[in-house]
Amino acid sequence: MLRTRGLSAVVIVLPLLIAIALGMVALAVVLAVVAAIGAWEAFRLLRMAGYPSLHVFGTVLAVALVLEAAWQPGGDKATLLIGAGAVLAGIGAFARTDPRDGLIVWMATVFGAVYVGLIAFVLQVAANGPAVPAGAALEPLGAARGWVLLLIFGVWSFDTGAFLVGRQIGRHKFLTHLSPSKSIEGVIGGLVATTIVTALMLAGLGQQPAGALILGPVLGIAAQAGDLAESMLKRAAGAKDSGTLIPGHGGILDRIDSFLFAGPVVALYVLALVG
């Protein structure tokens, strides 16, 4: 199973690492593609759960949120974009003859677009990450690449730590109505792994490693919450995976769910450092 998970992850990991190496434009393109596929999968799950939507419009809006973050990192146009999208989705829902159906379409469209559009916070992390001091271990990477890698490695370390510890000693289950395989021991193992990796990354970026005592657990909890949020969506839809794009591990949404919640957390942290 671990081998299958590893092979599946390569489908996302390799393009993402190549994009980071090439620069922020390449990263924005990859994230826009990811948002498009992820939104399509999310709207499919919503439809299966009984929540119809304007899925094409919602997918375009999700991608627009990513492109806006790339075009004007750190700007405030995203709020305007979400507002305009909510208005247009509401107008589009007028076509439903049953007002109750129209309300569901309106809410599901806005929710799906904003939910997947959270991936845009990866670009906010890149844009707002504090400069790496001269002499720091990760100085050659630069601030944008370094802080995005902190986010990526933080999420992956939680996922790996939780999986390995949970499989070995996981005894006490929690939130089994969302994900029967999750255990308290696994979550603790994931939080420890994330905190250690985050401390190493902060040190490499010229920051105080002690900051990981705050960022590590919060990042890990956010990653776990992102995973559970998608599990709730899949449970409501009666689906095991969000799609079949990645052999052995479902769809794109199954691979980015943790980043959707962890991205805003790291973005908030770097903004606090800059402020």
Image (cartoon, grey):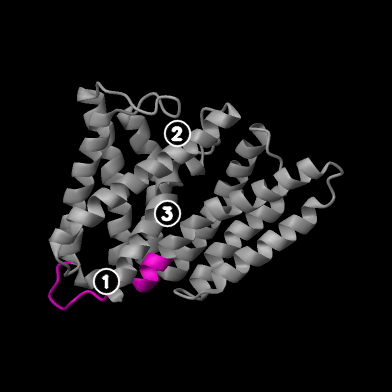
Depth check, front residue: 20 or 228:
228
Picture coordinates of residue 206 (x, y %)? Answer: 16, 70
41 sits left or right of 86 in the view: left
Of the numbered discs in the image, which one, if any, rests on residue 233?
Answer: none
- Residue 135 highlighted magenta (yes or no): yes
Please give the range of residues in magenta: 124-137
Say what amino acid the circle numbered 3 marks: Pro
Dot 3 corresponds to which residue? 15
Specify which label sits upstream in the sequence, 3 or 2.
3
SS at badge 3: helix
- Residue 63 highlighted magenta (yes or no): no
Say what amino acid the circle numbered 1 marks: Leu
Q: Which quadrant does the N terminus fall into?
A: top left
- Secondary structure mainly formed by the magenta segment: loop
Dot 1 corresponds to which residue? 273
SS at badge 1: helix
The crowd level at tag 1 (other Cα within 10 Å; few <14, some 14-19, many 20+) is few
For the image, the number of numbered tags is: 3
Depth check, front residue: 14 or 137:
137
- Residue at horizontal 53 percent and vertical 51 percent from the top: 115
* Closer to the eye: label 1 or 3: 1
Depth check, front residue: 26 or 145:
145
Q: Is the residue 61 above or below the residue 111 in the image? A: below
- Residue at horizontal 20 percent and vertical 67 percent from the top: 205
The crowd level at tag 2 (other Cα within 10 Å; few <14, some 14-19, many 20+) is many
Q: Is the residue 134 above or below the residue 200 in the image? A: below
Say what amino acid the circle numbered 2 marks: His
58 sits left or right of 203 in the view: right
Label 3–label 2 contact, CB within 8 A: no
